[in-house]
Image (cartoon, rainbow, N blue to C red):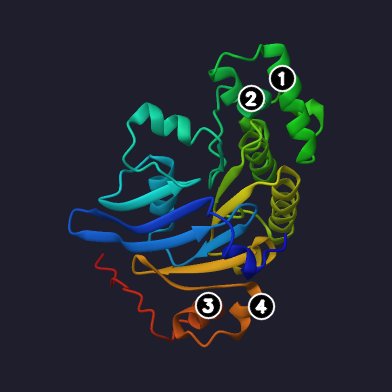
Amino acid sequence: MVFFKTQEETLLPKIRLSHLQKAFGHKKVLAGVDLDVYPGESLVIIGGSGTGKSVTLKCILGLLTPDSGKIEIDGQDIATLPRKEREKATAHIGMLFQNAALFDSLSVWENVAFALLQNKKTSRTEAKKLALQKLAQVGLKKDVADLYPADLSGGMKKRVGLARAIATNPDIIFFDEPTTGLDPIMSDVINDLIVSTVKNLGATALTITHDMKSARKIADRIAMLHEGKIIWMGTVKELDKTKNPYVKQFIAGSAEGPIKMEIKADKA
C-alpha cells in the first residue's frame, strides 16, 4: 500500500473526524480529535492505554455517541443520523476485535458468516460456501469450519475474526489491537494477512495499536493520540525522523519523558 500526499489534496476523505469530543462524567477522553483517512489508505492510531483509541472507534461505529463534533463517512455526517440510518451507513464497515470476539455457541463458519446469516438474504448453504472462501483467504483449511472457538488457538481465533471482518467485502475495515496476546511470529503472520487482505479488497483501514512493529508494517500513515487529541501524524519514514518528544518517548518505550504515568502505590 502506497499513499502519496498529493492524493490528499484531490481525494475526499473516506473518514473524517472533526473536533470529536467525548467525556465520561468529569473525565474527558476525546478532547477534539481531528483526523482524515483517505480511500485505500491504511492509517494506524498509536497511543498509550486510556488515551481514547478504542473510544474513537466506538464513536465511529455508533457504539458510543460523541458529545460534539462530526463523524463523516464519504462526506456524510453520520453522528447525528437516526439509529437505523446510521446502521445502514456503517453496514459496509468490517471489524476485527481485540480478542476476536467470536461467539462460543456458533461454529467457525457460522461466526465468519454471521452478518450474512443475520440479514437473512443468504441461504445457509451459500453462507457456508462464502465463509469457506474467506477462511481460505486467511490461510485456514475447510476442516476448521465446523470447529468451535474453544477448539482454536489464539492465532487461529484472530484469523477467524479477520475472515469475519472481510466476509461482506467491506470498503472500510477497523482493526482493534490486532496482535494483542499473540507471540511475535504469529503477530507477524497477522500483520501480513492484514496487509494482503486490505490490499486485495481495496479497502480503507483504520487500526489502533500500541504494537510499534505492527504499526510500522501495516501503516501508510501513523497518527499519535495523546490526552484526547492527535498530536502528530506522518509516514513511517517520518516517524523515525520526528523530534516530537511525546512520539519519541512512546516508540522508544521509555519511562523517561513528557508522558507521565500515574502509578498508584499498592496500599494492600
Give the side of residue 194 with respect to residue 30, left or right. Answer: right
Q: Is residue 175 above or below residue 85?
A: below
Q: Nearer the viewer, residue 85 or 123?
A: 85
| Chain-order first, disc 2 or disc 1 | 2
Q: What's the mark number on residue 237?
A: 4
Is there CB contact under 8 Å for labels 3 and 1?
no
Is there CB contact under 8 Å for labels 2 and 1?
yes
Give the side of residue 153 with respect to residue 173, left or right. Answer: right
| Chain-order first, disc 3 or disc 2 | 2
| Chain-order first, disc 4 or disc 3 | 4
Give x and y (percent) for residue 139. 80, 40
Q: Residue at x 54, y 18 (%)?
A: 119
Residue type indicated by callout 4: Lys
Give the side of residue 34 with respect to residue 130, left or right. Answer: left
Badge 1 marks a residue whose secondary structure is: helix
Residue bearing mark 2: 113
Q: Is residue 223 above or below residue 111?
A: below
Residue type indicated by callout 3: Gly
Of circles 1 and 4, which is in front?
4
Is there CB contact under 8 Å for labels 1 and 4?
no
C-alpha gap between disc 3 and disc 1: 44 Å
Q: Nearer the viewer, residue 267 or 44?
A: 44
